[in-house]
Image (tube, helix red, strand yellow):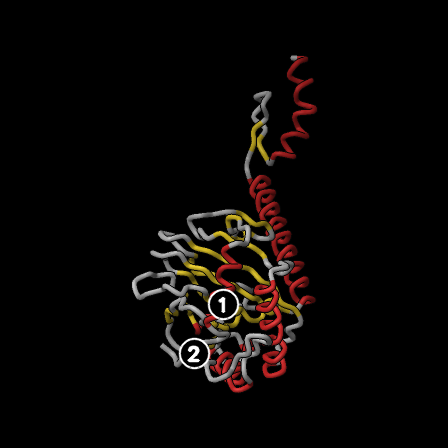
Amino acid sequence: MAAVLSASLEAVSLEALEICDEVVASIAADVERQGYAVVDGALGEAHASALRASCLAVEKKASTIAEGTEMTVDGSRRDDVVGWVKESNDETIARHRRAMDGLRERLEAALGLKMDSSSFMTAEYAAGSKGYVRHRDAAPRRPSGRKLTALYYLNPAWAPGDGGELRLWPGSCDEAYLRGAAGAGADLAVAPKNDRLVVFRSPLEHAVLASRARRVALTTWFFNRLELGLELIAEKRALRAKANEEEAQQATKAAEEIFECEVGCGFRGAFDAVAAHEKTCRPAAAAQ
């Protein structure tokens, strides 16, 4: 497994929850070089403990998976429950949001990804959960609104064998515009240890492995608001174009099929031709 950073050396103030400049610089360097970064002791055990309690208290619903521009529940592919916490008034959650917004601004200064906003979601997998199949958080093409995904784990009792690891495929987003992610190495599994922060490029393929113990995390996405809207428009246009293509193919297939006059005169041809013929054929047959 790749080297794991540590933010434990006075990197965090419980009031400000600010990751030190040295660690932020290391996160930016790792993300640019290999597509991801792992930081242990990111925000402190006290914050992790308080945030876990706050996240467990959040009302959650069954997670959904995108099907084109629609969202559907599919427990065979993803079986966690989630709650969106951008508007939460809980002080611990609000403090975490401020810390992540600060991290976004500093990573933006280092990486220049045009990140201008954040969204926040807590996710919980019950013991015995299947996990989340291999997927991306953003399309590996432009426009792509989500730039970075930041996972903060809240599992103080996690032990080897509990499962729930994050599997990453660093070489899965090697498009030129992502810079530095090409040839990043083989896939790896990252344990959901308490107070661990994982930051990776959102187009990078990843999965959550089956959990044998309760697994809690708070996810932050750093994104560009304009490109997120343009991405949705592009997806809708692509789906519309696909539907039009399928409709055209069906029309072509229908046009190529051979039909026979129902009157029984033996006339054969395309549907439209036979339909036009039958308008004059019926009276002729009736007069005989």
Gap between marks 1 and 2 measured at Cα: 20 Å
The residue positioned 37% from the left and 71% from the top of the image is 188
Q: In the shown orientation, is residue 89 left or right of residue 58?
A: right
Q: Find numbered disc 2 in the image and state the secondary structure of the residue it sits on.
A: loop
For residue 233, above or below residue 246: below
Q: Is residue 237 visible?
A: yes
Residue 117 location (% of width, % of height): 65, 69
Residue 176 location (% of width, % of height): 54, 78
Mark 1 / mark 2, whichever is N-terminal = 1
Marks 1 and 2 close (CB-CB < 8 Å)? no
Q: Mark 2 points at which residue?
A: 184
Number of residues whose C-alpha sits closer than 10 Å to that of mark 1, classed few (under 14), some (14–19) or many (20 or more): many
Q: Find numbered disc 1 in the image and state the secondary structure of the residue it sits on.
A: strand
For residue 282, above or below residue 56: above
Q: Quadrant of the C terminus?
A: top right
What amino acid type is highlighted by mark number 1?
Leu
Q: In the shown orientation, is residue 269 left or right of residue 6?
A: right
Q: Quadrant of the N terminus?
A: bottom left
Number of residues whose C-alpha sits closer than 10 Å to that of mark 2, classed few (under 14), some (14–19) or many (20 or more): some
The residue positioned 41% from the left and 64% from the top of the image is 155
Q: Mark 1 points at which residue?
A: 151
Q: In the shown orientation, is residue 251 left or right of residue 190?
A: right
Q: Nearer the viewer, residue 205 or 221?
A: 221
Q: How many labels does the image show?
A: 2
Q: Can residue 142 be seen in this view?
A: no
Residue 224 location (% of width, % of height): 65, 69
What amino acid type is highlighted by mark number 2?
Ala
Q: Nearer the viewer, residue 214 or 235?
A: 214
